[in-house]
Amino acid sequence: MVRGRRFLTSCLLYMLPRKRAAGEGEVVDDTTTSSSSFNKSRIEGSASASNSVNSTLNNSNSDSRFTVENNDTEVTITMAIGDGNPQEIDEDLHSRQLAVYGRETMRRLFASNVLVSGMQGLGAEIAKNLILAGVKSVTLHDEGAVELWDLSGNFLFSEDDVGKNRALASVQKLQELNNAVLVTTLTTKLTKEQLSDFQAVVFTDISLDKAIEFNDYCHSHQPSIAFIKAEVRGLFGNMFCDFGPEFTVVDVDGEEPHTGIIASISNDNPALVSCVDDERLEFQDGDLVVFSEIHGMPELNDGKPRKIKNARPYSFTLEEDTTNYGVYLKGGIVTQVKQPKLLHFKPLREALSDPGDFLLSDFSKFDRPPLLHLAFQALDKLVCELGRFPSPGSEDDAQKLISLASKINEGLGDGRLEDINPKLLRHFAFGARAVLNPMAAMFGGIVGQEVMKACSGKFHPLFQFFYFDSVESLPTEPLDLSDFAPRNCRYDGQISVFGWKLQKKLEDAKTFIVGSGALGCEFLKNLALMGVSCGGQGKLTVTDDDVIEKTINPQFHVEALQNRVGSETENVFDDTFWENLSVVVNALDNVNARLYVDQRCLYFQKPLLESGTLGAKCNTQMVIPHLTENYGASRDPPEKQAPMCTVHSFPHNIDHCLTWARSEFEGLLEKTPAEVNAYLSNPSEYTSSMRNAGDAQARDTLERVLECLEKERCKTFEDCVAWARLKFEDYYTNRVKQLTYTFPEDAATSTGAPFWSAPKRFPRPLQFSSSDPSHLHFIMSTSILRAETFGIPIPDWAKHPKKLAEAVDKVKVPDFQPKKDAKIVTDEKVTSLSSSSIDDGAVIDELISKLEHIRSNLLPDFRMKPIQFEKDDDTNYHMDLIAALANMRARNYSIPEVDKLKAKFIAGRIIPAIATSTAMATGLVCLELYKALDGGHKLEDYRNTFANLALPLFSMAEPVPPKVFKHRDMSWTVWDRWVLKGNPTLNELIQWLKDKGLNAYSISCGSCLLFNSMFPRHRERMDKKVVDLATEVAKIEIPPYRRHLDVVVACEDDDDNDIDIPLVSVYFR
């Protein structure tokens, strides 16, 4: 069991490693200004106070609280000690976020100052996401004090903080998330003039009148200040965005521009453009595109954007008359031109009465947003009248809210709603005071992303209102009003919405979280605040390679394990473990692990809450026993792999070049040195295995080992430089000369078609030059890593361009003559480049003989040092070599080159990740967790979600039910498992099935057949126990904790129709 308080640091820092922590008490006074149009003067509380703030901080070692005077108003400002936000981007630290935003957007974020007003649960989530993203500064504003009520919604607060100012209680823990962000506080009444210090302001707890006043100021300010108003009230939430009269979206979706490889262009009006069927086109009607590299129709190579229409998977029409253009010959790339978009936001004052189109999230509730628009206005009026929120369970307060909503509706004239849904408004009133953690997490992700859009112009803003509710998360059974009464505990806010009975179920739940990365840490935070597994009967198990050591809730009963969940750990996660679980939450990053957990949940009939993120996108899937299909019921199509011949000889995009580069890296620096060591460690066994294999692959392996120890063995760093220079010549000159000798530019296929037709690109050999920085960088990274494999010290001059150039220019490069009989694979179906021959065995014997001779001249302890590719260390030259290998190859084929960062994304297979989509996904899952643990909910109550925060798009729908199989009066789904107890014999099992009208003709256990009606000898097994047959015939080893075994039975009905029946579990203990 693991206990503690500092869950915040241990979990959320997973998302942003603290690689730039400042020294104790150190403050960096960063007064650098940016020329970006998105940047304004940096602030630390107020414009007039900023100099005083910096002066005070620079003369203080530890005390970060002070008072300044601003326009005759005393303003208390607290600043947590950080390192002042350097402008340089740590690409290692922010690699996953860079993969989403890019450098320019990150620079704009690093220059942005943001105000978050209202530090209840929603404000804390928004601030967390902004700080993890790395904005320049976040100022926390709140005039109120922490209440016990706040603890179920805000992960920053503990019981010790009750009575303290919310902003002051939050600042230090938020600062710990990222020392590169300046986190300050304001604890007194906010004036609109103070808003001018920020690029974006967010209000989470503000009256409508005050919001209108502040929004008017922000809207008319020059330049405009992005204004966001957001609030969550129980299971209801809303937000409003106003980024000013004119706001330019630089990139509406964040996707790479789509491209296509041209196959033909007609001389028509309009012209038809056809592309190769290598990949489907992603163009849409109205897109602008540019053409390049076209042979025969030079008029289209002018770089002018052109509009297309009639977009199809492999063709489109160009709105241009090409009748008099040159005749298309070959080649050509068409690339989408992404256009900026200008948006005109209305201020809140106008938008309230004329909201326009609401952003929908759930199409089963298409009429809900107008009602919630009305409800939140009524709530604002009620709070102004009462001076408080409606009391939980108070029918009087609920009726007052309904009455106010009715009056507002009547005043709308023709725009009034026919039904204001009093039942829904009653639920709204009962929970209006509560800020639920799942709602705060979800809206915290959405709002955080909108702030970053406002600061950067990246992605399309939410325009302008968004309303959401999850009223179906409420318990299915009607509750007594006393059940909502507070109990003077940290969960009172949640109890006011769901009642005490569901709270007890949450606390006593036995929960399994699989994975404790970014998603897993967010889940742990959310579940702790919800009180899940915090009761006397509750227990939460989390497993991953990293142990979660601390928790935010001292009542959280956690067992942290370092075991991967899989078939190899079924002794740890045994039958009893799975049978005792209440729910499983997946926080995994690979499909195979998800499928395994899915099968376990299917087998033991446990709810599985599944989610995943990819950049700004996220999805959730609910897998509920007997109600929904399981995760594995539907699969995404496998990613298309480039044919081996394309990667090795005919690349046409940078991905092909990087795939080849990664393969060469591993072959040269990892696999071959490892093979050398395997041979030297046990020569007789190694050579024996090669002789036994006797194939082309064994021959190729021995040739590489021999080459490494003979011709290409390096003893000095100069040898490594020479090897690198010759590799350059081999890769980028000789191989290209051989390829173009075998297949000249005018070569034709057997059908007479041009060999070098799209998507193939005709290559040109490179001429090495030590004055070319990219050529020299290839030599540097290659020679350094080669020296590392041989254990050769790296001299200082190796990293000095001039001295390295002098060394490489001394290398003698032999002339190359193309071979007439060279074999180059062109068949896309071929999976290996090794070609077998009839004399492989004789060649292998000869190679082994040479190896033995070379080994006799080596020192007995000579070993190489294989290098495993590691993308996350920028000092190890791994990515330098990968990028150099790929870019020189791209240069051969006139493919656009990429920088090291982009190469790292592709070759390192980095999954883009940002805190906002992670937060939203976990919030949505936890809203479903209420339903799963409450039980009794119908299929239509659950929601699967796909969201793209970049667009923004929210698509929620009820899950798909499982497929139903029927036989006679029986029906079953994939969730069913038939159980036969009493340690039956084979005959008893067959008879048990026959009583159901099923004739078993085949019974298997594992991969072994226990019975088949076609084999007469199997009749002799009829009186044997099924478990004995499994151990004797199938050689199944049954662990002591297992009380049953599973058999797969193939059956027919009486009409000889095959019937798919569930798995049969035979209990023998």
Image: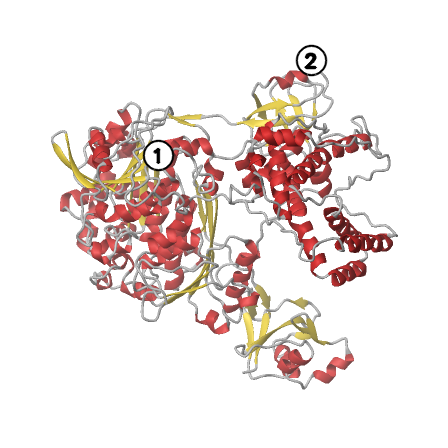
Q: Secondary structure at mark 1?
A: loop
User: How far apart are the alpha carbons under marks 1 and 2?
Assistant: 48 Å
Q: Nearer the viewer, residue 463 or 1037?
A: 1037
**Can the viewer see residue 460 in this picture?**
no
- Residue under circle 2? 324
Outermost residue toward the top? 324
Q: Nearer the viewer, residue 266 or 886?
A: 886
Mark sitting earlier along the chain (1/2):
2
Q: Picture coordinates of residue 320 (x, y %)?
A: 62, 18
Q: Is residue 737 left or right of residue 258?
A: right
Q: Is residue 997 left or right of residue 827?
A: left
Count every numbered label the image shows and give the total.
2
Q: Is residue 1012 left or right of residue 565?
A: right
- Residue under circle 1? 464
Neighbours of disc 2 within 10 Å: few (<14), some (14-19), many (20+): few
**Can the viewer see residue 485 in this picture?**
yes
Q: Picture coordinates of residue 23 (x, y %)?
A: 32, 44
